[in-house]
Image (tube, helix red, strand yellow):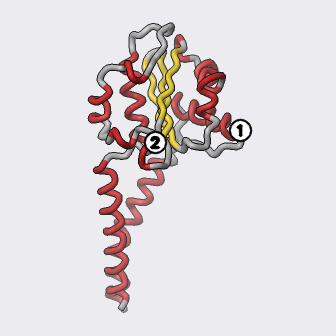
Amino acid sequence: MASFTHRLRLLTSPLLLASLLLLTSVTGGKQPNEKESLLKGINNFRKSQNVSALTMNKKASCFAKEIAKQLEGESCSQVTDPNSIPGVPDILKKCKINISTTTDAIMLSVCVVNRVPNLVLNNFTQRFYGNYLKSSKYSGAGIGEQNDWTVVVLSTNTTAGSFLSFASTSVCCRLSYLIVFLGLFLKWLID
């Protein structure tokens, strides 16, 4: 029995350590940055509309960040049409996003001189963009900033709006197989 307990400790110790490291990196006592503050403000707006909060979508964030870089140097008076931004196929490739997982998503961009946080939030929650932020269709967000530009990409929980890549899907499946395998291995150890 002692050898079983020893083997189980050897097996679970690395998993426990990895979990603790992940938790401390996620819950570190850092101050929220502009993106986190903007997402919090958008989620407060959604809450006031009785719509569930958006979660941060890493791939949508990569896309938003790269789009914001493309807008750098553009005048705030310019209206941005996502279809007019050059290099979108390259951005999708750089962020490892399959284009078929972006069709239900939407990109919103605002330009506020010096990116004054309250003005940026007001620009997203008022008028035209506010209708998108009120929609329960969207469940995730990616935020990118560059100079005066702030880009918010809203994603859905559908395949057509998730911003996933084929690689992400296969990694998820591989992880599921690994968990099942570990469960069977632990059952074998116990029996």
Query: Which residue: 52% across, 13% down?
Result: 114
In the image, residue 94 sits, relative to residue 77, either above or below, namely below
Give the mark, 2 or 1, whose residue is nearer the N terminus.
1
Query: Which residue: 38% across, 34% down?
Result: 62
Q: Quadrant of residue 16?
A: bottom left
Q: Quadrant of the N terminus?
A: bottom left
Query: Which residue: 47% across, 18% down?
Result: 149
Classify residue 22 as left or right of residue 96. Answer: right
> Which percent across, then down, holds residue 17?
39, 62
Q: Which type of secondary structure does the marked residue at label 1 adopt?
A: loop
Which residue is label 1 attached to?
49
> Which percent across, then down, holds residue 127?
65, 22
Classify residue 131 as left or right of residue 68. Answer: right
In the image, residue 102 sits, relative to residue 6, either above or below, namely above
Which residue is label 2 attached to?
57
Q: In this orientation, which residue lies closer to the viewer: 125 or 99?
A: 99
> Which percent across, then down, holds residue 20?
44, 58
Q: Quadrant of the C terminus?
A: bottom left
Q: In this orientation, which residue lies closer to the viewer: 114 or 44?
A: 44
Q: Quadrant of residue 14?
A: bottom left
Q: Which type of secondary structure does the marked residue at label 2 adopt?
A: loop
Amino acid type, callout 2: Asn
Amino acid type, callout 1: Gln
For the residues marked 2 and 1, what is the alpha-carbon distance in whole angstroms?
A: 21 Å
Query: Which residue: 35% across, 42% down?
Result: 100
In the image, residue 160 sits, relative to residue 150, either above or below, namely below
In the image, residue 123 sits, relative to residue 7, either above or below, namely above
